[in-house]
Amino acid sequence: MSLECLESQIGYVDMLCFFSLYYLFLVNNICPGKLNVNMKLSLKRVFTLLEISWSHEFWS
């Protein structure tokens, strides 16, 4: 895998993580404590998938 490709991959993952966290932050500010279990689970799933895809890309 080329370095440029790896860098763009990392940038993409970082951006997704950032937007997920930003979304969480906004939701918590607008309605504190209203973050439901489903949302938490789906965010956890997103981060797990990102982690898996990132490590797969990184080590392959």
Image (cartoon, rainbow, N blue to C red):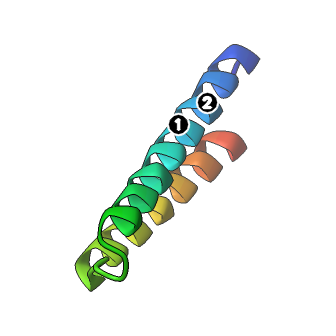
Quadrant housing residue 40: bottom left
- Residue at 63%, 20% (x, y): give it: 5
- Secondary structure beneath dot 2 equals helix
- Return the x and y of residue 59 as percentages of the image width and height: 71, 46
- Residue nearer the viewer, 9 or 14: 14
| Quarter of the image with the N terminus in it | top right
Tell me: residue 6, above or below residue 48: above
- Residue at 47%, 50% (x, y): give it: 22
Residue type at numbered disc 2: Gly
Q: Are marks 2 and 1 in contact (CB under 8 Å)?
A: yes
Q: Residues within 10 Å of mark 1 (few under 14, many from 20)?
A: few
Residue type at numbered disc 1: Met
- Farthest residue to the right: give it: 3
| Quarter of the image with the C terminus in it | top right
Work out whether residue 18 can be spotted: yes
- Return the x and y of residue 16 as percentages of the image width and height: 47, 42
- Return the x and y of residue 33 as percentages of the image width and height: 36, 83
- Residue at 59%, 47% (x, y): give it: 54
Mark 1 = which residue? 15
Mark 2 = which residue? 11
Q: Is residue 56 left or right of residue 41?
A: right
Q: Is residue 59 left or right of residue 28?
A: right
- Residue nearer the viewer, 15 or 46: 15
Quadrant housing residue 37: bottom left
Q: Is residue 46 left or right of residue 7?
A: left
Q: Residues within 10 Å of mark 2 (few under 14, many from 20)?
A: few
Tell me: residue 11, above or below residue 41: above
- Residue nearer the viewer, 53 or 34: 34
Work out whether residue 46 can be spotted: no
- Secondary structure beneath dot 1 equals helix
Disc 2/disc 1 C-alpha distance (Å): 6 Å
